[in-house]
Image (cartoon, rainbow, N blue to C red):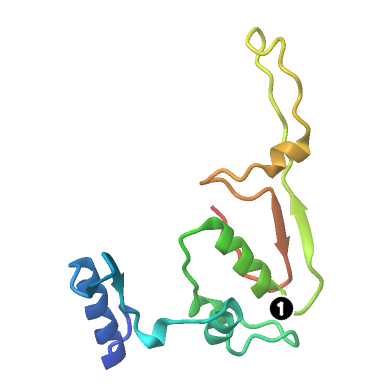
Amino acid sequence: MRLHHDSNSHQFAQWLLDIGHCHPLLPTDNSFSITLLSEIVSHSEENLINAIYDSLSAHHIPPPQYFHDRVILTPLNNSVHDLNHQILSYLPGEEHSYYSADLQMFEAGADEYAEAVPPKVLQSFNPSGLPASHLCLKKGCPIILL
């Protein structure tokens, strides 16, 4: 939004500043609410995906620049995974699944009585800051390597 210099981006920037200063908070029934701008409201995930990735179809692989100009931000990892899976279904081609190689390490003298944890149990954990143990990719989908 910072790069756009039109009246809509200025209005949106002002709205964000107002929220930061608690200006649009309206008291209703002993609680506070924020009135969202109609332009930023989406009534379903599919509508949101279609609004951002409007020309994404299952017939061709888009050029890399296509994804460079589009992004959906969400605060929850589960939402990210759900949206990524749904967007991946729009891309053509076969989906490939990749799994992490999870291994439990035992420390001599400290873990003498520990039992091995099966890889399926290790893969069920989804700690914050670590990648998911199951990755689905298709040719042409963007990935971020850290």
* Percent position of residue 91, x then y: 71, 78
Q: Is residue 30 above or below residue 127?
A: below
Residue ranking furthest to the front: 29
Q: Nearer the viewer, residue 114 or 2?
A: 114
Residue ranking furthest to the bottom: 7
Residue drawn where x is 61% and y is 61% of the image: 81
Q: Is residue 3 above or below residue 99?
A: below
Tell whether 47 sits left or right of 96: left
* Percent position of residue 135, x then y: 70, 56
Residue drawn where x is 76% and y is 24% of the image: 116
Query: Dot 1: what SS?
Result: loop
- Counting every numbered tag in the picture gives 1
Residue drawn where x is 55% and y is 77% of the image: 67
Q: Residues within 10 Å of mark 1 (few under 14, many from 20)?
A: many
Tell whether 26 sits left or right of 1: left
Residue drawn where x is 40% and y is 87% of the image: 39
Q: Is residue 7 above or below residue 82?
A: below
Q: Nearer the viewer, residue 66 or 125?
A: 125
Q: Nearer the viewer, residue 65 or 122?
A: 122
Quadrant position of the N terminus in the picture: bottom left
Residue ranking furthest to the top: 109
* Percent position of residue 48, x then y: 54, 81
Q: Which residue is mark 1?
A: 91
* Percent position of residue 79, x then y: 56, 63
Residue kind at label 1, given as amino acid type: Leu
Tell whether 146 sits left or right of 137: left
The part of the image, by quadrant, that contains residue 137 is bottom right
The part of the image, by quadrant, that contains residue 33 is bottom left
